[in-house]
Image (cartoon, grey):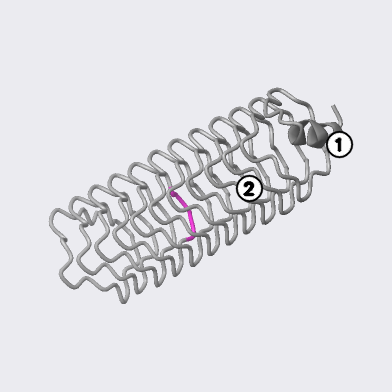
């Protein structure tokens, strides 16, 4: 099926396009909100400024796709392949991305408040200045990811892997990082006020000038961490493992 056929069918009321093959297609500005594209082959396709709100894209192949400034509010990408996709400035508010592959994807300035990313593969992902407020990232893999100046207010990153990640100047107020691994991560000038880092692994991390006001660092591991200028007013430092 060609793109024009999809558009005409959609306008005629069709919503089920499951398993369709539109690889390397130009779908810039297209409106497929509420469409069923589960299992579709959309790799390297272009969706610049497209509207896929509430669309079903679970299990779809979007590897290398361009979704710059697209509207994906409430869309279901669970189990989809978005490896190396460009989602810069895309709106993924309330999107479901359980177990999604986002390895090497670009999400700079993307909006992901309340997005569900449990178990997602986000290694090497670029999330600079992205909004992940209240997002669920339990058990997500963010090794080597860059989240410079990102917003993660009240996000759930419990047991997530952020080894070698760059979180410089990130806003992590009231974030849940309990039992997360941030080995060798950089958090220079980050704000972790009232964050929960119970049992977190911060070994070898750069915590220069991090604000831990009222944070819970109980039983966290800080061996070989760089802590110059770290702010620990009213911080729970009981049981910290320094070696």
Q: In the shown orientation, is residue 190 left or right of residue 37?
A: left
User: Considering the numbered disc 2 on the image, is that residue within a helix, a strand or a loop?
Assistant: loop
Q: How many marks?
A: 2
Task: Pick whichever, 175 or 145, lies toward us.
Answer: 175
Which residue is drawn at the image coordinates 84% and 36% (left, top)?
3
Task: Pick whichever, 6 or 223, lies toward us.
Answer: 6
Quick one: quadrant of the N terminus? top right
The percent coordinates of residue 143 (x first, y second) are 49, 47
Q: Which residues are magenta?
A: 162-166
Task: Pick whichever, 10 or 190, lies toward us.
Answer: 10
- Image height check: is 127 above or below 170? above
Would you name the residue on which mark 2 appears? Answer: 105
Q: In the shown orientation, is residue 19 left or right of residue 79?
A: right
The single residue placed furthest to the left in the displayed view is: 238
- Label ID, residue 4: 1
- Can see residue 42? no
């Amino acid at each position: 099926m060609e793109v024009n056929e999809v558009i005409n069918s959609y306008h005629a009321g069709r919503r089920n396009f499951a398993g369709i093959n539109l690889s390397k297609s130009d779908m810039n500005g297209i409106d497929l909100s509420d469409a069923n594209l589960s299992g579709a082959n959309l790799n390297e396709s272009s969706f610049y400024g497209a509207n896929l709100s509430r669309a079903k894209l679970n299990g779809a192949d979007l590897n290398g796709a361009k979704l710059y400034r697209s509207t994906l509010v409430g869309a279901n990408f669970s189990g989809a392949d978005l490896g190396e996709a460009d989602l810069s400035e895309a709106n993924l508010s309330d999107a479901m991305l359980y177990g999604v592959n986002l390895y090497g994807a670009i999400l700079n300035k993307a909006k992901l408040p309340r997005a569900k990313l449990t178990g997602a593969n986000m290694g090497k992902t670029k999330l600079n200045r992205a909004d992940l407020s209240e997002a669920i990232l339990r058990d997500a893999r963010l090794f080597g990811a860059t989240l410079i100046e990102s917003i993660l207010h009240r996000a759930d990153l419990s047991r997530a892997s952020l080894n070698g990640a760059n979180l410089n100047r990130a806003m992590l107020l009231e974030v849940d990082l309990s039992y997360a691994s941030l080995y060798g991560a950089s958090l220079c000038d980050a704000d972790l006020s009232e964050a929960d880092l119970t049992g977190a692994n911060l070994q070898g991390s750069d915590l220069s000038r991090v604000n831990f006001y009222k944070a819970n660092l109980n039983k966290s591991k800080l061996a070989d961490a760089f802590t110059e200028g770290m702010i620990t007013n009213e911080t729970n430092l009981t049981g910290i493992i320094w070696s």
